[in-house]
Each structure stands twice: as structure tokens, then as C-alpha cells.
Image (spheres, rainbow, N blue to C red):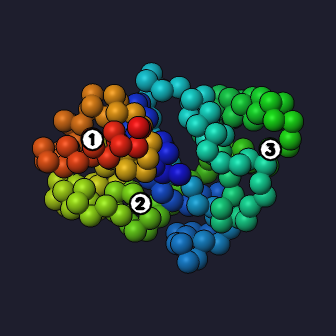
Amino acid sequence: MEALYGSLKGVVRTRAGYAGGTKENPTYYSLGDHSETVQIDYDPSVIPYGELLDMFWAYHDPTEPSSCQYAAIVFCHDEKQRTAAEDSKDRLERRIGRTVLTQIRHYVGFYLAEDYHQKFYLRGTPEFFKEMSAYYPLTRDLVNSTAATRINGYLGGLGSIDAIRQEIDGYGLSPSAQRRLLVRVEKRQK
């Protein structure tokens, strides 16, 4: 899910983690009552919250029951977000004619997942991961990087060639890595 939002204009950063439970400092192998989730930092003047919700509904089956670990949940930071989430859920139920099981809950806190869960597609592509790791030697900086977020999204098969062309020079990639990433995105869109 992290890559889903990474290439969207206006998304500043995505981070994989855990939320919704009561256990202190959960880990992948000791989640307690938390669910795996993605934290999205975004600029609402560029991408509205409703657009993030539309993407969320489109990329998972909200009618499918799930375990606590993989529960589909929208964590709302305030009443405005809650209202928008509830309204979008209601519209979706009317459109599909089925009950949406996705939960809408108040945000209480977020625990960052282990490093190996962050930027999954970037980590799985050594040629790009090596360059980004050289640019961001500290893992926390890589995880919080907008450039790494973007590259992860494009490597995950999302985002348009036009969008990446507009901003690729700011990613910190070498010219040859830029060309290779552009070729990958172009091939995917054909």
C-alpha cells in the first residue's frame, strides 16, 4: 500500500507501520492488536484528502473480511477527515450495493515498521536502492525522503511518465539511473 500513494503529486512521504492497537512498540512478529498501515504526509493544497480516499477505496476490496493484522482502516486525525471518510464510504456502499467492512477510526498513534518494510519496491531494486542509500546514508532519512517515496511508487508500477519527467531531476539519481527509471515507467505505460 505504501507505493500506491508514493508517486502522487502532493504526497510528501509514506511510511509503513502499525496503528490502531494498544500494545506499546509493536513489531511485525509481535503486533498485538495493531494493524499494518501506511502513514501518508501530504500537502492538501496540492492533493485533497478526498483524492487519497478515492485511491484507498479503488485499491483494496472493502467488502472482504480481514484479520486484525491486515484490517482495512482509515485513521482520521480530526472530525473533518472523519466526515469525509464516512461520506466517501457511504457513497461507495450505494455505488456497489454492498456493505463496506473497512473501519473508520480516530487516529491515536503510529509506530514505524522495521526498516525492511519501508520502501518495499525501492529496496527490491538494488540498482536504485544503492544510489538512494548513498544519498541518504541514515535509514530514517531514506524512509522520510520524498524522493525515495516517489521512486518507490514508480517502481511499484504507479504514476505517469509525464509526472516523473517533471520531477525526476530532483530525486538525487545519477543520469544513468534516471534514464533506467524512465525506461521502466515508459514500458509499463505501453
Q: Is residue 151 above or below residue 159?
A: below
Residue 159 x, y percent position in the rendering: 42, 37
CA neighbours of label 3 inside 10 A, class few (<14), some (14 to 19), many (20+): some
Q: Which mark is residue 182?
A: 1
Q: Residue at x 39, y 33 (%)?
A: 160
Mark found first going from the N terminus, 3 or 1: 3
Asked if one can make out residue 76 in the rendered structure from this viewpoint, the answer is no
At mark 1, the secondary structure is: helix
Mark found first going from the N terminus, 3 or 2: 3
Quadrant position of the C terminus in the picture: top left
How much space separates mark 2 and mark 1, taking CA atoms? 19 Å
Residue 114 x, y percent position in the rendering: 43, 68
Q: State the residue position of label 3.
A: 100
Q: Which mark is residue 120?
A: 2
Q: Are marks 2 and 1 in contact (CB under 8 Å)?
A: no
CA neighbours of label 2 inside 10 A, class few (<14), some (14 to 19), many (20+): some
